[in-house]
Image (cartoon, grey):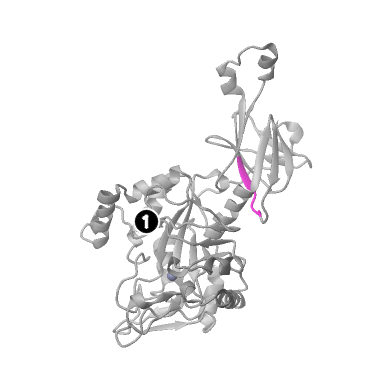
């Protein structure tokens, strides 16, 4: 909403308002779509974390075999993501989609790769590991089923029935979800905020089974097939519908040392057929203020000897390239739960303004996060504060375009006032996270 200052004088005299006055004296107050007024949020989505690892033919451990079951051992998935992602990009955030029960094999029989697959509570080592991950700020654990699905007797991977397709009715689905989330809570003391359908596959009662189970957000669809715009974050029922927007296996054509690899050819195909590149896709998402969610898997190794794509091992050069590319933008690195929680406040809280007065009115339930606002049109050389109706004073932080601050999602009013010595000691500056 735009507020015009000192225009009344012109209106009263019946004269036209000079454009110069309009430009200089206009104060605008707008809600920021993302926390800290950042351009877009970024998250790495890691599918199929579970208490499982594959056994190589020679029995030796090696990078890529681990779905999580190696915990913090050498050659573990955890060591790999720390060494290759968090060491160089410590501000990055990852939401891991956890299978809580025994992760079912894709195929069974003599041809199937051997593995060890257990429930998350079956070994003390994994219990400790999961409890550690659940309280490490780099990670969020989200629900990804109890088994991930049902293996068929056909011996073929395409006979595998994804978990939410395998439930015969709503009751069975809800009971299974309850068992999965209880198991996680028993092991770690934490609760899931959201989750994802296994293989993004669902049926007529899948969504109801999720809404009945009290999740804050859910990943219903993969959206990276739509490379020109894609689906933005939104709501489905009263949950945040979280999109998956970047396929970690869509390589940048700038990674020329991959020029003889299949992934490079695939990227060329996208460029020729879909007229887009990885960089083009990222720029579109940033310009539109849309979520950048980089999709991956813990392990490339499947029971049928095919490789699982995308995966963090084969795609690591590309994932590191994406994170390096994004450095030049002003982005918010957060988990799916943090992004969803902020988005709920953004959509659920109205901020209106008139002259120098700002009013905050919540219109949706369960808004927890402070809402960030940007104020433009006040003198950049001065210090400003908001004075709340209850006397609270909130400092405004100067940014490249205007001033920023965050306000609680409660019904309240504030006045924009110039900071002066009489406010001494009451000025509390805004803390904006720098990457
Ligand atoms: Zn999965």
Ligand 1 has an atom within 8 Å of the beta carbon of the residue at disc 1: no
User: Which residue occupies 42% across, 68% down?
Assistant: 199
The quarter of the displayed image where residue 222 is located: bottom left
Q: Is residue 412 magenta?
A: no
Going by the image, does 279 lie left or right of 172?
A: left
> How many marks can you see?
1
Residue 306 placed where, x, y %?
30, 74
Instruction: Note whether 140 is above or below 23 in the view shown.
Output: below
User: Which residue occupies 62% across, 73% down?
Assistant: 189
Q: Which residue position holds label 1?
A: 225
Q: Can you say which quadrant of the picture contains the N terminus?
A: top right
Q: Residue furthest left?
A: 260
Residue 110 placed where, x, y %?
30, 88
Residue 413 placed where, x, y %?
73, 39
Q: Nearer the viewer, residue 328 or 49?
A: 49
Q: Residue furthest bottom?
A: 110
> For numbered disc 1, what is the local secondary structure?
loop
Instruction: Note whether 222 is above or below 206 in the view shown.
Output: above
The crowding category of the residue bearing disc 1, from other C-alpha atoms within 10 Å (few below 14, some 14 to 19, many at least 20), is few
User: Which residue occupies 52% across, 45% down?
Assistant: 38
The quarter of the displayed image where residue 213 is located: bottom right
Q: Nearer the viewer, residue 214 or 137?
A: 214
Residue 384 placed where, x, y %?
66, 33
Residue 249 makes an appearance in the image: yes
Magenta span covers which residues? 367-373
Q: Nearer the viewer, residue 287 or 169?
A: 169
């Amino acid at each position: 909403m735009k507020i015009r200052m000192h225009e009344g004088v012109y209106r009263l005299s019946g004269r036209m308002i000079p454009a110069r006055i309009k430009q200089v004296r206009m104060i605008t107050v707008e809600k920021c779509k993302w926390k800290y007024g950042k351009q877009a949020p970024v998250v790495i989505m890691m599918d199929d974390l579970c208490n499982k690892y594959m056994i190589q033919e020679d029995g030796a451990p090696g990078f890529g075999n681990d779905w999580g079951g190696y915990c913090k051992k050498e050659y573990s998935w955890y060591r790999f993501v720390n060494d290759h992602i968090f060491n160089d990009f410590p501000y990055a955030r990852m939401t891991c989609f956890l299978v809580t029960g025994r992760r079912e094999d894709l195929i069974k029989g003599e041809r199937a790769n051997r593995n060890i697959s257990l429930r998350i509570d079956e070994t003390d080592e994994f219990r400790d590991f999961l409890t550690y991950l659940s309280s490490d700020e780099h990670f969020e654990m989200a629900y990804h089923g109890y088994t991930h699905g049902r293996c068929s007797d056909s011996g073929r991977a395409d006979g595998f029935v994804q978990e939410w397709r395998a439930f015969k009715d709503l009751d069975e689905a809800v009971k299974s979800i309850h068992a999965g989330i209880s198991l996680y809570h028993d092991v770690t003391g934490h609760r899931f905020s959201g989750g994802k359908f296994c293989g993004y596959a669902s049926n007529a009662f899948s969504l109801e089974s999720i809404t009945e189970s009290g999740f804050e957000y859910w990943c219903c669809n993969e959206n990276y097939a739509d490379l020109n715009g894609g689906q933005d974050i939104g709501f489905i029922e009263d949950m945040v519908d979280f999109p998956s927007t970047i396929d970690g296996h869509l390589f940048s054509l700038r990674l020329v040392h991959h020029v003889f690899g299949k992934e490079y050819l695939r990227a060329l195909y996208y460029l020729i057929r879909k007229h887009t590149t990885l960089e083009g896709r990222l720029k579109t998402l940033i310009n539109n203020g849309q979520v950048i969610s980089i999709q991956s898997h813990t392990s490339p190794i499947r029971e049928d000897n095919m490789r699982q794509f995308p995966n963090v091992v084969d795609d690591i050069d590309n994932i590191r390239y994406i994170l390096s590319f994004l450095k030049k933008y002003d982005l918010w690195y957060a988990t799916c739960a943090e992004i969803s929680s902020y988005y709920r406040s953004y959509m659920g809280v109205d901020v209106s303004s008139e002259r120098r007065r700002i009013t905050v009115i919540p219109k949706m339930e369960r808004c927890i996060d402070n809402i960030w606002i940007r104020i433009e049109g006040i003198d950049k050389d001065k210090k400003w504060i908001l004075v709340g109706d209850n006397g609270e004073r909130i400092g405004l932080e100067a940014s490249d375009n205007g001033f920023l601050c965050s306000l609680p999602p409660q019904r309240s009013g504030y006045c924009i006032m110039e900071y002066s010595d009489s406010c001494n000691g009451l000025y509390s500056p805004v803390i904006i996270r720098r990457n």
